[in-house]
Image: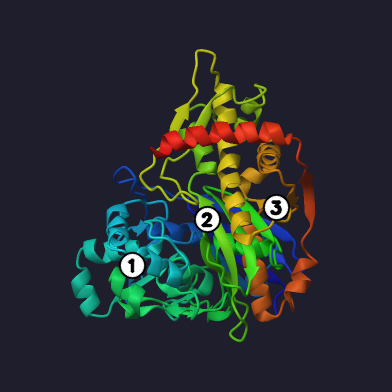
Amino acid sequence: MGQFVLAIDQGTTGSTVALMDARGKLRTSVNYEFPQIYPRPGWVEHRPADIWASVCKGIRAILRKKICRAQDIACIGITNQRETSVLWDTRSGEALNNAIVWQCRRTTEFCESLRSAGHEKRVRRRSGLVLDPYFSASKYRWLLKNTPGIARALKSQRVAAGTIDSFLIWQLTAGEAHVTDVSNASRTSLMNLKTGRWDQYLLDLFEVPRDILPSIVPSSAILGHTRGVPGLPDGIPISGVAGDQQSALFGQACFGVGDAKCTFGTGSFILMNTGSELLHSNAGLLTTVAWQLGENSKPVYALEGGAFVCGAAVQWLRDGLKMIKTAPEIEELALQVPDHGGVEFVPALTGLGAPHWAPDARGTFTGLTRGTERGHIARATLEAMALQNADILRAMESDLGKRMKPLRVDGGAAANNLLMQIQADVLGRRLIRPQVIETTVAGACYLAGLGVGLWQSPAAVKNIWRAEREFSVAMRPGARRKRMASWNTALQRTLL
């Protein structure tokens, strides 16, 4: 068997392809961005062909580095932007419409109509999710009602639906496998958390035919084999799949109950391992499947809270306001001032997620004066990223009824030392940053390696994980309470 794992991390703004060796060392990676499409305010789309092209380009680039031969690849792991939804033609493999991205809010009115009709409690009890356009089910429904020629394609049984993991596996296997792992399925609002199967009540509610959906499979098992992929031999097993946030939880070796991580990406996402316990939140959080290791094992569950805009706020300052030229510049700019100067930024640029669930909320700046400088805007942006997470983590503690363990952090923005210190201060908890902050990639590699026996158990994976730096709390409790009060005032104005 080969001694390398090829990982595909298909994200919101680009696709990363990486290579890990049998010792758990990430040897190399490449990333290729693709266009974001905004047809109307609040709408976000991707062209699935662009996504597949970026993945193929990444695979070719990795092989050109000649770290290993293609035949030395033991398996492939996939992690992906989760709720983004695609319909494609089962004969050609081509998308029938643009993918609707997880950030897209076009189905807000429909979700509100279901809520007004009294369906939310039952939906939440079965799926673990709230009624919100964030999740896949309402996106599938929109695509099924608005894609040209869809009725004829359905009648001909030529329609497949899935999240990005399913679409990629279909492409990698030349249509031989139409599957999704249980972690991705748990983000659709169509899977019953207790049974791990598509739920007929939910399918009927969202008007999604069962026969177009993929089969639900474990996160670590052989799910298909490559066929006809440029540069790769046929027969490489695809043996690990998980949604990006669950993959990051696994990549952080958060295998114990109460272990938690926060990924600072386009959005920020916090997951806490609750073990085999199906814990429903009373504080606005979501219950989700973290992973399932093989057919015969029980699923591991997690509580999750996510802020829709985290690193995307920095991208907005860069691309929209032209305040900085590169994302890392925000740390230097924010360090030019001693504090936020009374400026508050609530980055509800695509609504607010957990624990507020306000899809119509829009971003606000408050506290601006003649003395406000660019540094204050930068500082307020970083603090907003951390304060959103503090709201989520306190909601988690409320659900668990106890204080959380130190928080493990990852994602691109976790490299920002100022942001990490602010996060530790406003949360009042120690942070631990790993040596490998690309934990979504690491998680996909670990799951795939376990699926083919490259590693024998999660314990072997845990021995690979290493911390790089810890951030201790430097803010006094009184100062923290004052800071949170200022944030909450700005938040309430945004929610009006």
Q: Residue 125, relative to residue 295: is it above or below?
A: above
Residue pointed to by mark 3? 407
Quadrant in which residue 404 is drawn: bottom right
The answer to whether 13 appears left or right of 43 in the picture is right
The structure residue drawn at horizontal position 60% and vertical position 29%, both measured from the top left corner, is: 379
Query: Mark 1, mark 3: which one is toward the viewer?
Result: 3
| Residue extending furthest toward the bottom | 296
Residue pointed to by mark 1? 87
Q: Where is residue 173 in the image (x, y as percent from the top left)?
A: 47, 76
Amino acid under disc 1: Leu
Q: Position of residue 400 (x, y in %)?
A: 63, 61
Q: Residue 16, relative to residue 217: is it above or below?
A: above
Question: Which secondary structure lies at badge 3?
Answer: strand
Amino acid under disc 3: Leu
What label does residue 283 carry, if any?
Answer: 2
Whether residues under marks 1 and 3 lie with C-beta atoms below 8 angstroms apart, the answer is no
Which residue is at the front of the view, 310 or 398? 398
